Image (cartoon, rainbow, N blue to C red):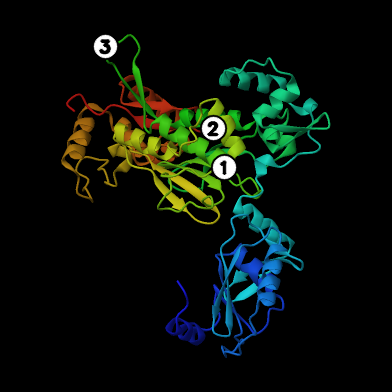
Amino acid sequence: MPLTKEELQIILEEGEGYRIEFKERFADLDRELVAFANASGGRVFLGISDESAVTGIAIDNALKSRIHDIANNCDPAIKIILEEFGNILIVHVREGTDKPYRCSSGFYTRTGPNSQKLNRNQIISFIQAEGKVRYDELVKPDFTEQDIDAEKLSRFLQMAGITPVLDQPILHKNLGIGEIQEGRVFYNNLAVLFFAKNLKDIYYHTVVTCALYRGRDKAVVLDRKDYNSDLVANVDMAMNFIKQYLPVRYEFTGELARKEIPQIPYQALREALINSVVHRDYFEKGANVMVEIFQDRIEITNPGGLVRGLTPENFGKISMLRNPGIANLFQRIDYIEKMGTGIERIRLALKEANVPSVQYEFNAAYVKAVFPRPLSSEEHTTLEIARESGEKVRRKWGESEEKTWKEWKKILGKNEYRILYEISENSFITINELSGKIGIGTTAIEKNLDKLKKKGIIARVGPAKGGYWQIIKRTESD
């Protein structure tokens, strides 16, 4: 819509801003055009001073032609629309669709009411944020065909259902891991991430770190593994780590094989893990994908905030790819669908299993998926169980908990009962810690634990060092 007197008056009163620039003459106009094109667009008012005074400018075809030449000489050319309002010439600049734009004096963008020149690091960050430079597409000049692990490539092709009938250079080009120039293949980071013989010797930040903690914080690490073989193997090994420490229960459905039901659906965790590997910011070399198992939750974190164009509101509803090459190779082996459906599949898997929903945390540095663990009532309870007959109960019990512990008190020996209570309070408790709390030797603790296991009340999950106790049976009357 054309400018009105009322609108101009408001603009003059408010002064210059993020999308408004005043200039008496068209000197340095190119940097203002570039700044608006690199930002959100805006208008340059020629014939108005910095103090918001209308000084006017002589408008003729020669002036208009010079302004169009200035816009066309930017790299790339900037599309503008000119509007006359009395002796004021308004240059409308749309937000560019091919950022970044530059003029003869450099790259600029808008910061508040000013046009700011970008330094080298700012230009790099700007280009990365715009998605013009993608980590997986960057050429790795010192990576050659001899650095490709033939077994990894063969395994991938088998998983993808690809018959390697083409010449190697053509095959590699079709996979997107290299470009053929003057008879030579120039490999990119995608080749390194999927098929390098020794990824850990090339990039250290591509690791997936898995950790098991005691309790609900990071004070005590019970087990930790760093996986950095290739992106596919990293996902598979991290899932094996999760399965090692995630409790399961079994259902007998009349079939020969029993049905294994994990505490959190493997499908949901796997989707979140693959998402973190596919969508992380690989330019960020100070952090890596984290899989952290706590007593009450599992957290999967990937470096880098949401991809440009995504918001917490549309997260999971549309598909935006930070690393399209990585996504393409994972899609070829059916690890993902490039349809933005992974988040919905996580939600449905959790809903079907009747377990708590995943929670997401977003900021500029990371995206985190938090899966609450639906722990047993013994692990959830904050009840202070009476250890000796006649001891006062200091918190009100729920009816089922009271019945369970009363029944246990009848059928268990004194030390068995006390050991079971300590396990219900801390499933990661050690034999030495049990000995200290109950006041009997470690040999006696082990004997009582064996009794509880033989009675089918408890089970050991995971190794002796780094595992935990699980209460699997309450009482016969439950």
The label shown at residue 254 is 3
Give, as a three-letter code, the residue at label 2.
Ala
- The N terminus, quarter of image: bottom left
Where residue 176 sits, quadrant-wise, is: top right
Q: Residue at x 71, y 20 (%)?
A: 150
Q: Residue at x 64, y 34 (%)?
A: 228
Helix, strand or loop at disc 2? helix
Q: Between disc 3 and disc 2, whose residue precedes? A: 2
Task: Looking at this view, name the residue that lies furthest to the front.
Answer: 61
Q: Are marks 1 and 2 in contact (CB under 8 Å)?
A: yes
Q: Residue at x 60, y 47 (%)?
A: 281
Disc 1 target residue: 289
Seen from the viewer's position, the closer of residues 451 and 354 is: 354
Where residue 350 sits, quadrant-wise, is: top left
Dot 1 crowding, Cα within 10 Å, few <14, some 14–19, many 20+: many
List x then y, in percent, for residue 325. Answer: 61, 36
* Cα distance between the residues tagged 1 and 2: 10 Å
Question: Is 25 placed left or right of 332 in the picture?
Answer: right
The label shown at residue 238 is 2
Seen from the viewer's position, the closer of residues 238 and 454 is: 238
